[in-house]
Image (cartoon, rainbow, N blue to C red):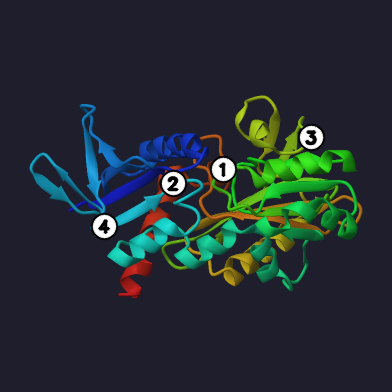
């Protein structure tokens, strides 16, 4: 009997467009001989499934079941490919915990924590060979004094970003103090990001992204690194999603020592944040010092054919089908172990 998979997509933020692209790709790669897959859209107005005939069926939120064609479909596991809220900030994970449905991503606490960039940096402080850019975390109550706080504590240039949010939405690189107020307002006003702003000193160097996952044997596997080279000022939303603006080199051209060091650091990050499933860690390699600086962690990384994780999976010598099977079977093993 096939395992019933709820492939979770959509979302309540502007990242829903990316989620639908990710889930469409994942759907084509899942092993249909093992899994019966239902693509479930989680949208503000409705949670639903659309069958091959284009008929929409609403999810019963009491138990996340699906009444369809006179019978009830109950799922064995949720494969979360929903970027942003509520699939990346712990809300959906908390709901699944309450109804007892296993899922592929980090748990509710880790998801909520890692969605908060400032809090994540605080937890990661102390990891050997991992460096953190000087920063200021601004709350809603700091809005009137935000610009002065930043100027008092940090040196130009700055990265100004929503403290919660993804896809570089609401982010600005500030090279002149005269542009700071506008950048802070943009970050504060980004939708669904919690009225918190993180301002960091800019780190000059090469930018990398590297995935890590726990396989079906419970082993941590770090994927090959990808280097990001963009014609934009930084790796912003347009650079991420408009073809031709960015070169992504996988595997990255790094030394054996840099590869081993980043692999060890990323495993430490995964353990310290109590991650599950697959995550992606972004970091800078500072030009002058060769130090690795943490940028952020993504607990629901993009899964289009061009996204970093699928690129790295292929560079690792796996097919996406094999990789997603490992993710699902690993999550099912955790669920069985935890009872």
* Tag 1 secondary structure: loop
Q: Earlier in the sequence, mark 4 or mark 1?
A: 4
Q: Which mark is residue 81?
A: 2
The foreground one among 152 and 143 is 143
Do tag 2 and tag 4 residues touch (Cβ < 8 Å)?
no
Q: Which mark is residue 294?
A: none
Marks 1 and 3, how far apart at CA: 23 Å
The quadrant of the picture occupied by the C terminus is: bottom left
Q: Earlier in the sequence, mark 1 or mark 3?
A: 1
- Provide the residue designation for mark 4: 76
Marks 4 and 3, how far apart at CA: 44 Å
Image coordinates of residue 84 in percent, x first then y, are: 51, 47
* Tag 2 secondary structure: loop
- The structure residue drawn at horizontal position 65% and vertical position 62%, both measured from the top left corner, is 266
The local crowd at label 2, few if under 14, some if 14 to 19, many if 20 or more residues have their Cα within 10 Å, is: many
- Provide the residue designation for mark 3: 233
Task: Quadrant for residue 230, please give it.
Answer: top right
**For discs 2 and 1, the disc positioned in front in the rendered view:** 1
Left or right of 199? Residue 168 is left
**For discs 4 and 3, the disc positioned in front in the rendered view:** 3
């Amino acid at each position: 009997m096939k395992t019933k998979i709820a492939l979770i997509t959509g979302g309540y933020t502007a990242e829903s467009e990316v989620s639908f692209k990710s889930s469409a790709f994942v759907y084509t790669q899942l092993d249909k001989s093992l899994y019966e897959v239902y693509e479930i859209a989680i949208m503000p107005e409705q949670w639903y499934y659309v069958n091959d005939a284009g008929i929409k069926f609403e999810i019963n939120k009491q138990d996340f079941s699906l009444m369809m064609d006179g019978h009830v479909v109950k799922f064995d596991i949720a494969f979360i490919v929903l970027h942003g809220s509520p699939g990346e900030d712990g809300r959906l994970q908390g709901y699944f915990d309450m109804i007892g449905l296993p899922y592929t991503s980090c748990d509710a606490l880790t998801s909520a924590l890692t969605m908060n960039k400032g809090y994540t940096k605080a937890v990661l402080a102390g990891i050997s060979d991992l460096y953190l850019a000087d920063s200021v975390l601004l709350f809603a109550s700091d809005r009137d004094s935000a610009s002065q706080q930043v100027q008092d504590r940090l040196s130009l240039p700055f990265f100004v970003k929503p403290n919660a949010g993804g896809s570089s939405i609401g982010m600005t690189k500030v090279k002149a103090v005269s542009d700071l107020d506008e950048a802070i307002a943009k970050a504060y006003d980004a939708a669904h990001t919690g009225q918190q702003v993180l301002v960091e000193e800019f780190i000059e160097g090469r930018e990398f992204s590297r995935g890590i996952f726990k396989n079906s044997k419970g082993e941590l596997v770090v994927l090959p690194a990808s280097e990001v080279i963009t014609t934009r000022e930084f790796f912003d939303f347009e650079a991420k999603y408009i073809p031709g603006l960015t070169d992504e080199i996988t595997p990255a051209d790094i030394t054996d020592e840099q590869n081993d060091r980043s692999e060890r650091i990323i495993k430490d990050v995964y353990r310290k944040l109590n991650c599950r499933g697959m995550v992606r860690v972004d970091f800078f390699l500072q030009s002058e010092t060769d130090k690795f600086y943490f940028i952020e962690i993504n607990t629901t990384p993009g899964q289009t054919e061009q996204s970093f994780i699928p690129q790295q999976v292929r560079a690792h010598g796996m097919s996406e089908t094999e990789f997603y099977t490992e993710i699902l079977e690993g999550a099912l093993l955790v669920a069985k172990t935890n009872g």
